[in-house]
Every structure is written in structure tokens, then in C-alpha cells.
Image (cartoon, rainbow, N blue to C red):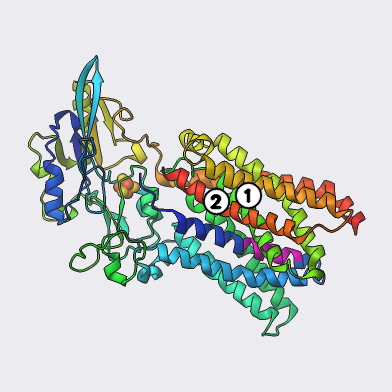
Amino acid sequence: MAYAMLVDTTKCTGCRGCQVACKRWNELSPEKTTLSGEWTNPPDLTGQTWTVVFFKEMSKGGEMQWKFTKWQCMHCEEPPCASVCPSLAISKTPEGPVVIDTTRCIGCKYCVEACPFDAVRFDSRGTQELYGVKLGGIKAGDIESGGGSVGVARKCHMCYNRIAQGRKPACVETCLTGAIQFGDRAEIIQKAKTRAAAVNGYVYGEKEAGGTSVVYVLDAPPQELGLPAVTPKRYSEVKADMYKSIGGFGIIGAIILGLVYYFTKPKAEEAK
Amino acid sequence: MSVEWGLDIAAYLFLAGVGAGAYLAAVVASRTNRKKYAAFSAAGIHLSWVVTIIGIGALFLHLGRPERFISAYSNLGSWITLGTWILTLFVGAGILSSLFLTKVKVSEGATSAVQFIGGVLAFLTAIYTGILISVLNAKPLWYSPLIPWLFVVSALSTGVVAVGILLLNRPEQREVVNKIDRLDIPLVIVEIAIIAAFLATVGARDAVANLIYGSLSAMFLGGVLLIGLLVPLGLSVYAVSAERKKPVSPSVLTLGFVCVLIGGFVLRYAVLLAGQI
Ligand code: SF4
């Protein structure tokens, strides 16, 4: 069955319980952070932080309001990250999660560049210990047992290993307010639409990137909340469009070259 | 957003472009006039795979897990995989062509067959460095069909001048070097036209603004437009007009060639950075 996660931001209180649950279940390291003047903490996703609640202050009718947006991989139906991965290390599972096989990842970071939701991160901890010299790493850190998770791309995997046991993802189970829910994708989308209609809000994730396995209910337009505007096209269409245009310009270029050659040829012969 | 594709990838895209351009120019030149361009074409062929291998080295160091690089050959739907195959075959064809020119004696047919295949691979190498980033709609600045063609033209111009630099201290090649210098005029003009069209049509208006008057403007306007395009163009035009009276000093040509190379590298670096920030 294809599952999906519902993030109903209108019910989020910004407790960050999901961030903690994610770290605990996935055995991720804590982040050293500094006082930045921002409330989002840690400030962004990293190789060791797979979900983060963005804190945003917005004024509505002259009144200040907090907007909390939990962020993580969207688990696209047709994931660009998997499509571009040269090592076939990323796959979309039938249950919905998009999972990185960190034992195959070569650390090229193409997926980091390809993700339209900016949700994959390169984890460079400890690459110095691995090679004795600095190869694309930042600072020496801890190498997890197995070593498979160093110098590779990492992100939320929707707790596919819990789903396999018939359990819900760690963040879903820990959420106190029901802001994160889990279930059959079709039902989740239905729920999201009903809720969005009730709060006069917006659904995000039903159509973006051809659909994703994370669906949001928002009470402000996605772009106002800082969520990326992503085409409803699937990645295969996105690529096909680009190939067509590249070919089109190639033909135009060839015609121009041909004309230039045709008109300059007599001169070239004279010169000989 | 973090910059994960920085200097090392820029160096790699640039060097692969130089290698591809040098090989392509070498093959085309030797088809036009084998005798006259013998030195040019030999230098281009030798240079092509050497710089490409250096570029692959930069790419290799970029990897988080270089010891697993072999799995990069796996996904034929990925432009890194396609590129890895293209580069492997291109370097192979380059080395073979070099051997055929020097140590190994083979029939003329075999030489030109390898050079033809190598030429096709060189073209694919040059265009792939652009397709690699232009298929990513996640980076709106890169999602432009003009980037692959821009990189092809830039590969040609940087490749040709790189060979020019190798021939500079050989007086008997002066005529060929002058030709290279002259060839740069149309290439630079085409490059400027493609860059203008790219900036005008691409969807990422913030990134374009960043290149033109934001934090990257010094790099883009100074490094790419001025040093990489206008200065070499001016020097070439000057050389062509002055050459009628007396030969211009080789240092003028050297300066122009070095500027083209700097511009080619900065172009890739600026496009990479602007796409990611
Ligand atoms: S959101 Fe990004 S990381 Fe997640 S599946 Fe889509 S492309 Fe991959």
C-alpha cells in the first residue's frame, strides 16, 4: 500500500518533539548551534538533522502570528534525486518512502542539487578519519558503526524500517497535537482537502513534482511561508522538455552555421 | 542553500571542456589540411586526454566516497553515469589517437576512424558538461537549454587557445597561432550572444540579478565578460589589424589566450555559484 504523511501546520505548536523523535529513532548526532536571532533550531536540515520545524513570524491584519512548518524530504512520487543518482543508490519504495542506500552512495551530491525541495544533505562528518587526508570533508567527527553513513547523502527516509514493522514514522507517533498523521495516500489527500477547506487554507504536496508522499495543510500561501514553488510536472517530463529545447537550439544553431558557411565559402576559396 | 558544487566541479567542467575542445579542433583541422596543421593537431590530441584526466581527478576528489566511484557507471538515466561513460571512452580514444600518432603504426583508415569516433566523443563530452546541470529544474538558473551550447562554444574556444599556448614558442607555427587568434573573434562573439540570450530568457531572475549587480557581479562582469571575452576580443582585433604592417609581439597573443582560459573557468564557477545561492 502507498502511504503518505500529513503535516497539518495549523495544529503545530512548535514543540519540536518530531525533531527529537527523529534523532532518537535514526541515531543521529546532535548539532552544535549558535545564537542566531532566529527561532528555527537547528537552523536548517543537515546530514544529521532530517527534519526541522521552521519558525516564522508573520503579521496578519496587524497582528503578529507564529507559523511553524515542519520540513523534511517530501518523498516524491517520481523522485528527481533517484532519477539523477548515478549509483542507483536511491529508490522509491512501493510503500511511499524514498530511501538512500548509503552503502552504494559515492557522495557526488547530484541529488542535493536535483531536489526541488532542497531536502537532501551531504554528510561530510569524519571523512578525514576515513582517508587520513581531507577529501571533501569539513571537520573530523564521529564515524558511526558500519561506516556506511559518512561522506554520503542523507535525508528523511520516512522511517521505512518502522513501516516494515507495521508502525508509524517516529515523528508521527510522537506528535501530541495530531499535526502529523500517517495513512493511505488517497485518504491523506482527502483529509488534507477537507481540513484546508475548513481553515480556508492551502494543500501542498498533492500536485507538486507530480505528487509527493508528504502532504501539507497550510493556512497561508506556500510561498509566503517560504516553501518552494515546484512545478506539477513529473521529473521525466521536466527532463524531456529540456531535451527538446536543447535539440531545438541545436537545429537553429546548425542552420545558422550552414548559412554562414554557405555565404563565406567563395571568399575562403579565393583566399587559397 | 549550501554550495555543494563549487570550485572542484567548476575546475572539472572547465578542464573537460578544454580537453574536448582541443580534440575537436585538432581533428577538424587535420581534416581540412593535414600537412599544414600537423603540429596543431598533434598538440591538440596529446593535450586533450591529459587535461581531461586532470579534470576527472578534480571530480574524484569531490566525491565523499571516492573508493566506490565504480558504481557511478550504474544508472544510464543519470547524466553523471552517461558522463562517466562518455569521459572514459573519450580519454580512451584520446590515448589511442596519441599512440597512433607516435609509437604505434597503423593504417591511415584506422587512425581516421579512431579520430572520427574520438571527435564525436569530444563533442558529447563538451555538451554533457552543460546538460549535466541544465536538466535540474531545482536550480532555475541552470534549467536553460542554452547552457549546453554555451559550454560547447566555450569548450571550443578554450580548447583551441590552450593548444595555441603550446605552439606559441615555435616560430615556424606562427601562422597557425595567428589563425587561432583570429578564430577566437567569431567564437567570442557567438559566446557573448549566447550568454546574452541565456540571461535574457532564463527563469531565475534573482540569480541573473545576482550575476549582474549582486554579490557575483565582480566575478561575472569582471572575470567572464571583461577578462574572458572583451579583452581577448580587443587583443585579437588589434593583432589582426596590426599584423598587416608588422608581426605583433607574441606576448599580446599570450595575454589574449590566457584571458580566454581564465574566462572559461570563471564562467563555469559563476554559473555554478549563482545557481546555488
Ligand atoms: S523531496 Fe527531494 S529528497 Fe525527497 S524524494 Fe523528492 S527529490 Fe528526493
Q: Which mark is residue B266?
A: 2
Disc 2 residue type (three-letter): Val
Check whether the beta carbons of the residues at disc 2 and disc 1 lie within 8 A of each other. yes
Q: Position of residue A136 (x, y in %)?
A: 36, 61
- For residue B80, side relative to residue A51 (left or right): right
Q: Is residue B142 above or below residue B11?
A: above
Q: Tell whether circle 1 marks a residue whose Cβ is less than 8 angstroms from ligand 1.
A: no
Subunit of mark 2? B
Q: Amino acid at mark 1?
A: Gly
Disc marking residue B228: 1
Q: Earlier in the sequence, mark 2 or mark 1?
A: 1
Categorize mark 2 by other alpha carbons within 10 Å: few (<14), some (14-19), many (20+). many
User: What is the distance, in whole Å, between disc 2 and disc 1 at their CAs?
Assistant: 8 Å
Query: What segment is highlighted magenta in the picture?
Result: B20-29
For image coordinates 70% across by 62% down, the residue present is: B25
Residue B260 image position (x, y, % from top left): 64, 54
**Secondary structure type for disc 1:** helix
Q: Where residue A160 sits in the image (x, y, percent)?
A: 19, 53
Residue A170 visible in rendering: no
Instruction: In this rendered view, identify the residue nearer to me: B155 or B84.
Output: B155
**Location of residue B113 in the rendering, given as x and y in whole percent from the top left corner:** 68, 72
Tell me which residue sits at (37%, 34%) in the image. Answer: A229
Judge left or right: residue B100 versus residue A176.
Answer: right
**Mark 1 crowdedness (10 Å alpha carbons): few <14, some 14-19, many ≥20:** many
